[in-house]
Amino acid sequence: MTVSETHSAKQNRQGWVCRCALRQPVIEKTNSSLAISLFILVIFFLSFLLTPGIVASQNNYNNILILLSDNKDVYLDVATTITNSTIKYCRNHGLSCQNSNYDIVHISSYEQQIHKNYKAIITLGTHAAIISGKNIQNITIISALIPKNNVLIQENLKANPNQHFIYLDQPQGHSLALIKALSSRFEDIGIVVDSKDQGTVESLQKAALRLELNLLIEQIFSDEQVGAALNNLLERIDILLTTPDTNIHNKSTVSNILLSTYRKRIPLIGFSSAYVKAGALAAVYSSPEDIAYQVRDNIIAYFSSKQLPLEQQMGKYFSVLFNTDVARSLGFPIKSESKLKSRMMDYIQHDFE
């Protein structure tokens, strides 16, 4: 190889983008020159594969942006769990997502063009879900840590066909499975629902039929009717079930509901850990960690097949909380939360609604 040929090869390695279209290798009809030319071509393709700009571009396409609605610790905890659990799973199974980078950004710091560098976007909380759904197009968005009955979310469900929702709410059948796991003597189950919420009524009736439970439903037309509906139920039921409807269960009504059920010695099943801490006997709910794992599953599904399970998903994973103090007050046997969850799985049979 002459001095000029060596210099040319170095130039090809350093600046192939400019050189490859302007200069073709000269191949003379001799074996030695053919070998030299082949050597140069090998160096050229190796430099192409190892060029930092190309590697960065490929990695950027696999990156994931996590947008937080605010500075609450729960959002950062969920984002961290999503990141760690996804990377671990992808590495263990040799998936391309093991090389992804995760950028965690507060929605207030979001820049309009930043999302173009990402393969998928995760939003945590209602605010981030709405802002991203309106402003980010042609990129898959997975929005989590949002309640299903949020009016703003319901209004924006069809605004972006690439946006998918993972709700905090558990399927209605899970709460009935918890009641079944608690005791066989809970046969007549009462519930107060909004007359407009026929979807909840249908889901409950379907699950009750499957679990052979008797459901007594009081439908109300305004929050002023909650007290009367509750009194009608308490005379006829073994246990009261609640749903995450803020028109029925809110700061102004929860204390009265808990007091009324306690006076009648009727156990109450909540829909959150907060409800149990306030005085409910037990609850099945989606913990932040449960939601993080469901987001992880969606990321893996998207990287594996570029498809997500459903546009709207109820809580797949769940936690159980049992209030021992309330149980003692009601004369109810103390139950193990892990055993309750195990029995629930037998009743649920992975039948997610």
Image (cartoon, rainbow, N blue to C red):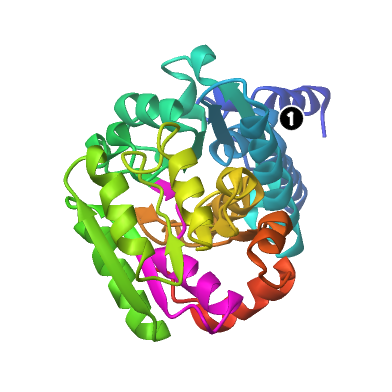
Task: Report the front residue among 306 and 147.
Answer: 147
Residue segment shown in magenta: 165-190
Q: Which residue is mark 1?
A: 9
Instruction: Give the answer, above or below, for where 202 lies relative to 67.
Output: below
Q: Residue furthest front?
A: 263
State which quadrant residue 82 falls in. Answer: top right
Task: Report the front residue among 44 and 141.
Answer: 141
> Which residue occupies 51% across, 29% down?
117
- Whether residue 182 is in magenta: the answer is yes
State which quadrant residue 47 falls in. Answer: top right
Instruction: Give the answer, above or below, for where 221 lies relative to 284.
Output: above
Task: Report the front residue among 47 and 144.
Answer: 144
Task: Report the front residue among 324 and 41.
Answer: 324
Position of the N terminus, as image quadrant, is: top right
Q: Residue 96, image x and y in percent?
A: 63, 53
- Whether residue 69 is in magenta: the answer is no
Q: Residue 69, image x and y in percent?
A: 51, 25
> Which residue occupies 30% across, 76% down?
206
Query: Could you tell whether 62 is left or right of 89 in the image?
Result: left
